[in-house]
Amino acid sequence: MYIVIVGGGKVGYYLAKHLLHDGHEVLVIEKDRKKEEALIAELGEISLRGDGTETWAMNKAGLSRADIVIAVTGDDEDNLMISQMAKSKYGVRRAIARINNPKNEHIFRLLGIQQTVSTTEIILAQIEREIPAHSLVHLMTLREAGAAILEARVPEDSPAAGKMLKELNLPDDFVMPLIIREGKGIVPQSSTLLNAGDEVVAVTTLQHEKLLEEILNNSKK
């Protein structure tokens, strides 16, 4: 695959290094001379010095043949502009944008950029795993598919503990494909009992993404 990365900072560097190792064709667009020289010294002639928001740089990078464009600059406005231009002007099938401020995610969605990565949200998800008060962790949100992958631990006092999955009366668009019990994965059946302390992974539509927490805690929000 031909992958264009805009932004040659630490994120762009490690992405490029990993993708090159996997055998992909990679080009990094970076406007800072020192960063671009560091990329060349470490990874070889895989960079283009220029502003990734400008048409000439996109043309020279050959965005029209790119399979994926990844915008990981430190500026959300630049990442949004790059992603939009990649999709609308150059017909790139997949454009992935880094979001530095989580408040901007809604704007990206409204403007058609569905594939985003928020480092803040990733860190928060890891924190939620360690804080008992946060029983529900969003592992992944698939906006284009309208689905979410969630994880939660069954509390000691959960009304769902001791019940079979079929007794939970789950809607058709809500499935539990995996239970982690004492460090071992279980692919449950309808007759599988939930135990307190189980970690449950659920896949559901965005409409029902709060349902897991309601089932395990018997709360309606």
Image: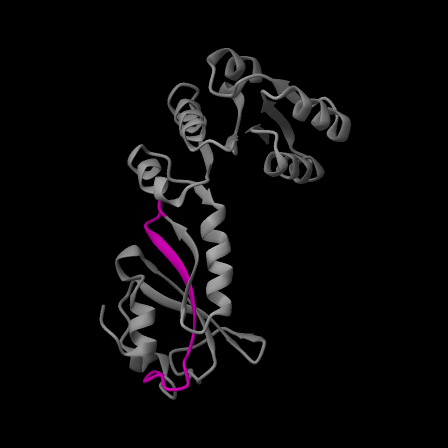
Q: Nearer the viewer, residue 107 or 26?
A: 107
User: How many numbered marks appear?
Assistant: 0
Q: Residue 79: horizontal and vertical position, in percent?
A: 45, 30
Residue drawn at 29 percent across, 68 percent down:
211
Q: Which residue sits furthest left? A: 220
Q: Vertically, is 190 above or below 175?
A: below
Q: Residue 41: horizontal and vertical position, in percent?
A: 77, 26
Residue drawn at 49 percent across, 53 percent down:
122
Q: Toward which corner of the image does residue 193 lie, by quadrant? A: bottom left
Q: Taken as a whole, is the magenta stretch helix, strand or loop?
A: loop
Q: Residue 24: horizontal and vertical position, in percent?
A: 65, 33
Residue drawn at 45 percent across, 32 percent down:
95
Judge left or right: residue 160 versus residue 73: left
Check residue 144 for magenta coloring: yes
Q: Toward which corner of the image does residue 11 lie, by quadrant? A: top right
Q: Which residue sits furthest top? A: 56
Q: Residue 76: horizontal and vertical position, in percent?
A: 43, 33
Q: Vertically, is 14 above or below 37?
A: below
Q: How is the image coloured?
A: one colour
Check residue 207 for magenta coloring: no
Q: Vertically, is 124 above or below 33?
A: below
Region of the chain picked out in magenta, as a range:
143-160
Residue drawn at 72 percent across, 27 percent down:
38
Q: Vertically, is 170 above or below 137?
A: below
The quadrant the N terminus occupies is top right
Q: Toward which corner of the image does residue 107 lie, by quadrant? A: top left
